[in-house]
């Protein structure tokens, strides 16, 4: 039998992830070591024993085998959170096609240890009489700093270091000799930065209705029986899914285990965390990309030490180092934000299922508009389907929805972005002192700038996209950040007739203020929320009634609950239908259903106006009637006919290079490799008899939707097959090609 080697991380501190070391696995330890196993290894010139974690097992020696040291021991009972996360990284590497370093940096996301915040306090163990003697001695010798400190200690008993160094003007050099003499001591207590420290717990519980109770009980029964599974909680907007999550969580927390709650994006953090914190108090923490590095480090440290039991955040929160994980909740599981765009291109839904299985935990997926993948699995019995068909509040019901044909508006002479029906309803809503939300899936003042003489649009010189005009008069690329002032003349032909076309959130805000001057208007998009706390400020102001109209992009229509909102206007419902994506119909249905769900969540009835140039499209019709089953049947028939996920598996390979000719040649090589593997692994006649596709369907290579970004050219190869294992083999073969390009893999 050949030699077996283990590549290990000797120190789990994140800045050292890039440097694994290789050790030989002794014959006696074979079968006991796996990826993630904690082991003991001789390290350094002195062969000092150090704890390490196995990140890879291989039969290939990276050095002279005679110079490779052996693993000393394996801790078979020490499979910790770190071990579990390293095993998860290995699975992600194999599943999504990345390097182990890329996977490790994803599951161990805090790359740099930040010095913890310390609270220093000056104290003394001396009797009061002796302290008074020292104070008088300092006064006699004119040691003013010592005198001030001794006086403060006599008055307060202990002195915060900040007070001593600030108001008392006492330096470290003054304290050192006093410490050495034993007169005082400086105690250092680590203080964790808590991003939600201002919230107050109230312990409020909501009485569940019959449907909510049945859903929660289904999970509890399985959990108590020792076999929690995967559940799809499919509930209409406003049906109270969060209350069901919290009931399930309470069962797990009562058992001494921990919970991870994933939310799709940072805009949901404020209201979501408020609800969980009021129920569970200091057991809850939050992590997101807008926290400082110190705050992020502190939250993971608190989780690792068992000082918190619930972590809430976007997909990176999935890798919280909980030792005894009992439940993972993924709210709004259909959201694209759960899919990573960087290697490894993992999907949080699949990765969460893997981590839950490793930890013996339950997984709950929640949505009012489930992804086709999740709903298909639920129908096949892979997930347990839990339904909520009614709104949780007795006085709340689904909003009445109207679809307005913008083609008819144009024919009748209305060129405004507001249809006549929407204008009428907005006026009525403002008169009743109720609130309005206006949604458009676009950012900026105008979508692009074009010359009316030659027809040329102003494009980014580094990316194959148009520049977006903002209200400050500057043109900006939303891909690479390139920015220029609005020119006076067309750069192509010199004509002065250049202007902005299309409508963005800034322009809608301006037009809204002109049409409804009496209304108080807020805008929420990436521009107005770019600074830390921007989301919370806008949402809190709108929730407190400080504005009548909230204008925004997708972040305003997902998960928020504003009881005084009785009108929602969708200004351009079909924008997303024109995206170069086979799932554009699904995206459109989901966002329109979410938008419609914001209206009428309080005691007053809600109205929704969907403005569109394609009122007959099935995704718009289904969203208007809030009919998910109708949409699912239509969309799945389309996916089956054209062989798209989840009807088949699809491997997407993206290649990029700064040299276009190199990219073209490499893309051809990728296709040839895919065809070769497809031929080697399939028998045509067997497939024909079984009715299963035997040859992989290969599309491309084609130009990426945005062909050039930041002077890098990009092409895509799509490969489809019913057998997921065949796609994995094709990916493995292409990974072995020596290509002078950057490769990215996406498995669906």
Image: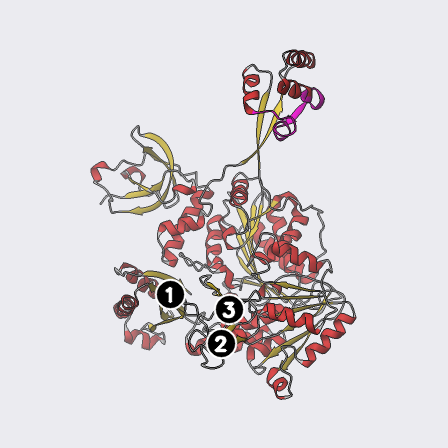
Q: Nearer the viewer, residue 655 or 310?
A: 655
Camera-side mark, 3 or 1 = 3
Q: Which mark is residue 724?
A: 1
- Name the colouring of the figure: secondary structure
Q: Earlier in the sequence, mark 3 or mark 2?
A: 2
Q: Position of residue 218 (x, y in %)?
A: 60, 57
Against 364, is 613 above or below? below
Which residue is at 23% across, 42% downward?
63
Spatial CA distance of label 3 from label 1 is: 50 Å
User: How far across and down, in percent of the image, does residue 656 sit?
Assistant: 34, 64
| Above or below, 25 relative to 391 | above
- Residue stretch rendered in magenta on the structure: 152-171
Q: Position of residue 600 (x, y in %)?
A: 71, 68
Q: Residue at x 63, y 30 (%)?
A: 166
Considering the image in quadrants, where does the C terminus appear? Answer: bottom left
- Rendering quarter of residue 236: bottom right
Residue for badge 2: 450
The residue at which mark 3 appears reads as: 486
Q: Quadrant of residue 561?
A: bottom right
Give the structural element (helix, strand or loop) at label 3.
Answer: loop
Front: mark 3 or 2: 3
Left/right placement of residue 489 relative to residue 660 reads right
In the rendered structure, the answer to whether residue 363 lies left or right of residue 281 reads: left
Q: CA distance from mark 3 to mark 2?
A: 11 Å
Front-most of residues 322 and 561: 561
Q: Residue at x 27, y 44 (%)?
A: 4
């Amino acid at each position: 039998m050949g030699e077996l080697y283990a590549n290990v991380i000797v120190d789990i501190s994140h800045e050292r992830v890039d440097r694994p070391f290789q050790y030989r696995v002794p014959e006696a330890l074979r079968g006991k070591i796996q990826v993630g196993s904690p082991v003991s290894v001789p390290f350094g010139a002195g062969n000092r024993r150090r704890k390490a974690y196995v990140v890879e097992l291989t039969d290939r020696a990276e050095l002279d085998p005679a110079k490779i040291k052996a693993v000393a021991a394996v801790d078979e009972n020490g499979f910790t959170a770190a071990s579990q996360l390293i095993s998860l990284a290995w699975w992600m590497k194999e599943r999504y096609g990345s390097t182990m370093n890329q996977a490790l940096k994803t599951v161990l996301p805090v790359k740099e240890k930040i010095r913890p915040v310390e609270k220093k306090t000056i104290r003394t163990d001396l009797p009061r009489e002796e302290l008074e003697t020292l104070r008088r001695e300092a006064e006699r010798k004119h040691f003013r700093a010592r005198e001030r400190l001794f006086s403060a200690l006599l008055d307060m008993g202990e002195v915060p270091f900040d007070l001593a160094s600030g108001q008392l003007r006492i330096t470290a050099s003054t304290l050192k000799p006093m410490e050495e003499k034993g007169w005082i001591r400086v105690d250092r207590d680590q203080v964790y930065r808590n991003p939600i420290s201002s919230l107050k717990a109230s312990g409020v519980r909501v009485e569940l209705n019959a449907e909510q109770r049945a859903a929660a009980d289904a999970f509890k029964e399985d959990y108590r029986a020792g076999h929690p599974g995967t559940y799809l909680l499919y509930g209409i907007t406003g049906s109270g899914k969060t209350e069901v999550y919290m009931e399930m969580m309470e069962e797990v927390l009562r058992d001494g285990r921990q919970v991870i709650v994933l939310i799709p994006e940072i805009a949901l953090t404020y209201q979501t965390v408020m609800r969980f914190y009021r129920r569970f108090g200091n057991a809850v923490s939050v992590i997101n990309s807008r926290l400082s590095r110190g705050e992020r480090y502190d939250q993971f440290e608190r989780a690792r030490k068992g000082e918190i039991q619930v972590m809430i955040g976007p997909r990176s929160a999935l890798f919280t180092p909980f030792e005894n994980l009992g439940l993972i909740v993924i709210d709004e599981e259909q959201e694209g934000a759960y899919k990573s765009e960087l290697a490894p291109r993992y999907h949080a839904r699949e990765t969460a299922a893997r981590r839950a299985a490793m930890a013996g935990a339950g997984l709950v997926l929640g949505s009012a508009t489930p992804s086709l993948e999740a709903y298909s699995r639920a129908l096949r019995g892979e997930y347990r389907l839990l339904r909520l068909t009614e709104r949780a509040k007795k006085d709340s019901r689904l909003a009445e929805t109207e679809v307005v044909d913008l083609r008819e508006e144009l024919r009748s002479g209305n060129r405004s972005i507001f249809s006549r029906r929407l204008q009428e309803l907005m006026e009525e809503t403002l008169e009743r002192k109720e609130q309005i939300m206006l949604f458009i899936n676009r950012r900026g003042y105008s979508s692009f700038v074009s010359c009316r003489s030659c027809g040329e649009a102003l494009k980014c010189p580094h990316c194959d996209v148009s520049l977006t005009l903002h209200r400050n008069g500057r043109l900006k690329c939303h891909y690479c950040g390139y920015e220029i002032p609005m020119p006076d003349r067309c750069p192509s032909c010199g004509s002065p007739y250049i202007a902005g076309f299309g409508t963005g959130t800034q322009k809608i805000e301006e037009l809204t203020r002109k049409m409804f001057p009496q209304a108080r208007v807020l805008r929420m998009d990436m521009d107005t929320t770019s600074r830390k706390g921007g989301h919370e400020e806008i949402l809190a102001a709108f929730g407190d009634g400080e504005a009548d109209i909230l204008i925004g992009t997708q972040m305003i229509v997902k998960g928020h609950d504003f009881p005084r909102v009785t009108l929602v206007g969708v200004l351009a419902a079909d924008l997303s239908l024109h995206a170069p994506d086979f799932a554009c119909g699904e995206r459109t249905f989901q966002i329109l259903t979410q938008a419609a769900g914001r209206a009428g969540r309080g005691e007053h009835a809600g109205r929704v106006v969907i403005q569109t140039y394609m009122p007959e499209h099935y995704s718009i019709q289904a969203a208007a009637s809030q009919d998910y089953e109708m949409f699912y049947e239509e969309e799945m028939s389309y996916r089956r006919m054209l062989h798209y996920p989840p009807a088949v598996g699809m491997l997407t390979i993206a290649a990029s290079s700064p040299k276009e000719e190199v990219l073209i040649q490499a893309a051809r090589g990728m296709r040839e490799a895919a065809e070769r593997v497809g031929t080697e692994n399939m028998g045509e006649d067997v497939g024909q008899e079984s009715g299963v596709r035997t040859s992989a369907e290969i599309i491309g290579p084609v130009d990426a939707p945005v062909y050039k970004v930041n002077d890098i050219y990009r092409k895509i190869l799509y490969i489809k097959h019913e057998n997921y294992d065949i796609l994995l083999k094709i990916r493995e073969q292409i990974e072995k090609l020596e290509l002078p390009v950057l490769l990215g893999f996406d498995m669906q």
